[in-house]
Amino acid sequence: MNVVLLCLSVCLVGGLLMSRLAKKLNLPAVTAYLVMGTLLGPFLIGRLGVSGIGFSSLEEVAGYTLLSNVALGFIAFTIGKEVRLAELKKMGRQAIVVGILQAVITTVVVDIALVALHLMRPDVISLSSAITLGSIAAATAPAATLMVVRQYKADGPMTKLLLLVVAIDDAVGLALFSASFGVATALESGRVNPTTVIVEPVVEIVLSLVLGALAGWVLNWVERFFHSRSKRLSISIGFVFLTVSLSMLEFEVGGIHVGFSLLLVCMMTGTVFCNICDFSEELMGRVDSWTTPLFVLFFVLSGAELDLSILSNPAVLLIGLIYIITRSLGKYVGAYGSCALTHCSDSIKKHLGITLLPQAGVALGMAVTAQSLADGAVVRSVVLFSVLVYELVGPALTKRSLMAAGEIRPEGRASARRKNA
């Protein structure tokens, strides 16, 4: 236990110290945390084998999965507060259209490129893996985006639309992956299963939204029994723990596999709570301050999970480069086109797509599921490679796009507790 605590303290302090260097280089703190995690990982400092200083293996990093899931739950819960009814009435149609179209277009663009690669070099990638990777490309990481928005106090039409789109993206990505993975499995087995392709993803999305809505309503009801700020904060934290644990449940009903999306459940909990609770704004601010160390640990651990050994595989690098280029193109073109269709401003059309590039936990979860394919190891390696690139570059690009859109104030010497003048 003392080794675990030592390791967590090194991650937390090291990540925060690295963020000071990142500030000198004008990079987001998220990038610093990820770099620190990579340094502490099993391919660099971890190889020294010093107990408590770094991670000696990827399996050791995986031992902190519960901490990462809790952090992801709080990230999703925090995003939920951005989905206000007033904002939905104002730009709900735009968010839904952009959220769906950019994901679908990205999947189509990546599918075309990777299927073409399969036709030219079937020994490099199978058709089932090409289709699966196309659907994984739709997923966007909400964590890195939210951290950049919070660090620089970004605010404006594009930031509001971005957070709504990110909230929708998980449901769309889940549906696309379930359908594509079902088709990929059918190609390998020669048998199509409508339950896996259509029914199960719809059930997962609906049940996740229902569970989250119920949790948000119950949280608001329970909070009414307490008037102390500290006790209300404790209740909120307890409910996020509860929703994270419930979202991990899996079971079968009538031959249908039933599961929940952690992100959707926690986002919906935060959304419902913040829309029906009249003191939610102050309470969510206190939750934000409490979770900062947890988020630092989440990103440092995410950096430590990056498998640098994949960089030695030429086939993975080839597929990975095609995947990264076409996914980036799909996100930009998809966001630009859908924004034009919904009459967004020129600034949003030009910059929104870049902010959707970060990719991490959701995509990795999909890749783990895809390992059951014949060459599922290739899918996982390609996703790991893309996450390595997107997580290190994505936050900086997000910051740059938000600044170009005029939604991040120039940094001054003001306290981090208030907006810079």
Image: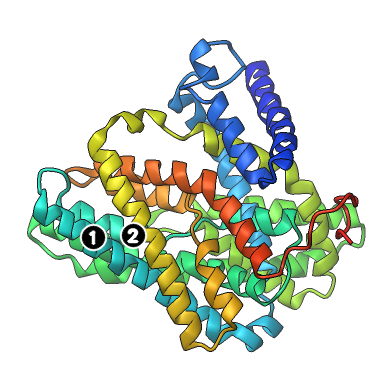
Element at badge 2?
A: helix
Residue 62 in picture, x, y percent from top left: 48, 32
Rendered residue at 52%/26% (across/down): 41
Residue 136 in picture, x, y percent from top left: 35, 57
Rendered residue at 80%/54% (across/down): 411
Rendered residue at 57%/24% (across/down): 40
Quadrant of residue 149 in the image? bottom right
* Tag of residue 344: none
Q: Residues within 10 Å of mark 2 (few under 14, many from 20)?
A: many
* Tag of residue 326: 2
| Depth check, front residue: 94 or 375 | 94
Residue at mark 1 to residue at mark 2: CA–CA distance: 7 Å
Vertical position of residue 196 compared to residue 121: above or below: below
| Depth check, front residue: 125 or 257 | 125
Residue 371 in picture, x, y percent from top left: 27, 44
Residue 159 shown left or right of residue 191 in the figure: right
Residue 244 in picture, x, y percent from top left: 58, 52
Looking at the rendered structure, the kind of residue marked 2 is: Thr
Quadrant of residue 281 in the image? bottom right
| Depth check, front residue: 70 or 302 | 302
Quadrant of residue 58 in the image? top left
Q: Which residue is mark 1?
A: 113
Name the quadrant of the C terminus.
bottom right
- Which of the two discs, 1 and 2, labels the residue nearer the N terminus? 1
Q: Are marks 1 and 2 in contact (CB under 8 Å)?
A: yes
User: What count of labels does the image hold?
Assistant: 2
Name the quadrant of the N terminus.
top right
Element at badge 1?
A: helix
Rendered residue at 53%/22% (across/down): 55
Residue 293 shown left or right of residue 206 in the figure: right
Looking at the rendered structure, the kind of residue marked 1 is: Ala
